Amino acid sequence: MGIGGISIWQLLIILAIVIMLFGTKRLRTLGSDLGSAVKGFRKSIKDEDDTTDKAEAEDSTRPSGDSNPKP
């Protein structure tokens, strides 16, 4: 028994049909495009976290203005 009641032989048949329909070159291109999209998504999430961390660090190092009362 495989995933969700699908056996390994049924998965192999589906894989063979997909390869015949799209071809190996197109599937390889699709895989590399998907990989680069995931990589770009992870990079944007990391960049967003870095900018958020920098903004929080700047806010904590700024003087609040209330510590120096006017004479």
Image (tube, helix red, strand yellow):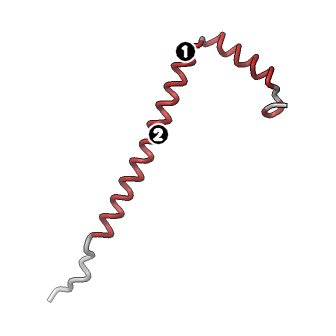
Nearer to the camera, 66 or 37: 37
Q: Quadrant of the C terminus?
A: bottom left
- Residue at 65 percent across and 14 percent down: it is 19
- Residue 26, numbered circle: 1
Q: CA distance from mark 2 to mark 1?
A: 22 Å
The quarter of the picture where residue 24 lies is: top right
**Residue 34 at x, y percent in the picture:** 52, 29
Reading the image, the residue beneath label 2 is: 41
Q: Which residue is drawn at the image coordinates 55% and 15% (left, top)?
A: 26
> Against 26, is 47 above or below?
below
Q: Secondary structure at mark 2?
A: helix
How many callouts does the rendering have? 2
Quadrant of the rendered structure where residue 23 is?
Answer: top right
Q: Amino acid at mark 1?
A: Arg
- Residue 21: x percent and y percent? 64, 11
Q: Amino acid at mark 2?
A: Phe
